[in-house]
Image: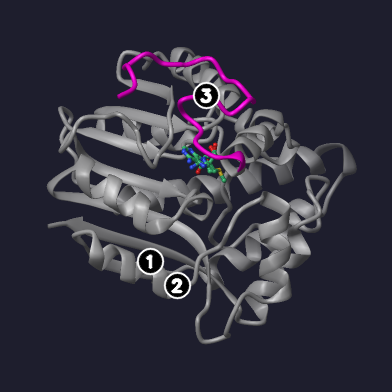
Amino acid sequence: MLSEKTTLPSQANGTDPVRTSPYQDSVAAYWNAERNPVNLRLGEVDGFYHHHYGIGEPDWSVLEGPQDTREERTVRELHRLESVQAQLLADHLGPIPADGRLLDAGCGRGGGSLVANRRFGCRVDGISISSHQVDFANQQAKEHGVDDKVRFHLRNMLDTGFETAAFDGIWNNESTMYVELGLLFAEHARQLKRGGRYVTITGCYNDTYGLPSRAVSEINAHYICDIHPRSTYFKEMAANRLVPVSVIDLTAATLPYWELRARTHLTTGIEKSFIDAYKDGSFQYLLIAADRI
Ligand code: SAM
């Protein structure tokens, strides 16, 4: 079992107790090296750094007007849309009491944990397989003055070392595609109290399309991930005492974010694949909330 210490030394030689496979080494290396302006510039707006996509109708006028303010306005608009997504996820966790405890599994640079702490006032633990992200996120918690309640740890979400039935709520915001769902949900079911809430927002491939489309395969290659079929979420939840209470298809709500992002200075090259995959019906953006029974 891992200690409660915030960070462990990161090693790329396979002896790191957090990472258990060469695949996980490559995921950690990706996130340790990641410095995309679409994540960093947006987070600088208010100190809530997210690594997920946005939802809602954009203000398209940010693409017009004087060049000298256009970049700043598009940054703020994309950040507004990703913040709406984080708030929607938090809506589905609650109510969480101030003495409750939450786990942000695959926490990125920590923005979602800070959102949940601000909403509920409760303790939040965020975990990532990237030591760079954990250090960055702990610095953010300090700057927000909440490091007594929000703590980030270098841990593997498949074997966290946290005690059994410790959490009132757990979420994965765009991080389930890095792990086998059966293993993940077994670990979540162990850590959640009975009646606790699990929420995920995730891209999944649409079983009715068939196997992954070219565009979905491009997304997998870009992020070194393995997008699961929609069916596997429900199969593995049912097998692990997680009973869905809400399922929301956010595909139509996220498409405008991608169409806006594709027209800004913040592209990463993967925008067309997302737009194609959402439009051809092979890919869906879902929120699933479930109760631990
Ligand atoms: N949830 C965050 C957000 O919404 O901003 C970050 C999402 S980012 C797309 C995926 C995250 O999953 C990264 O922080 C990565 O380090 C983390 N991750 C991937 N595999 C992991 C694992 N096995 N254990 C813990 N974290 C993992």
For residue 250, above or below residue 185: below
Q: What element carries label 1?
A: helix
Q: What stretch is highlighted in magenta?
A: 1-22
First in residue order: circle 1 vs circle 3:
3
Q: Nearer the viewer, mark 1 or mark 3?
A: 3
Residue 233, numbered label: 1
Residue at x 44% of width, y 19% of height: 141
Q: In which quarter of the image is the N terminus?
A: top left
Q: What element carries label 3?
A: loop
For residue 12, above or below residue 286: above
Q: x%, y% of residue 23?
A: 60, 44
Q: Which amino acid does label 1 sit on?
A: Tyr
For the residues marked 2 and 3, what is the alpha-carbon distance in whole angstroms? 32 Å
* For the residues bearing labels 1 and 2, Cβ distance under 8 angstroms: yes
Q: Nearer the viewer, mark 2 or mark 3?
A: 3
Residue pointed to by mark 3:
16
For residue 228, above or below residue 59: below
Residue pointed to by mark 2:
230
Left or right side of 164 for 215: right
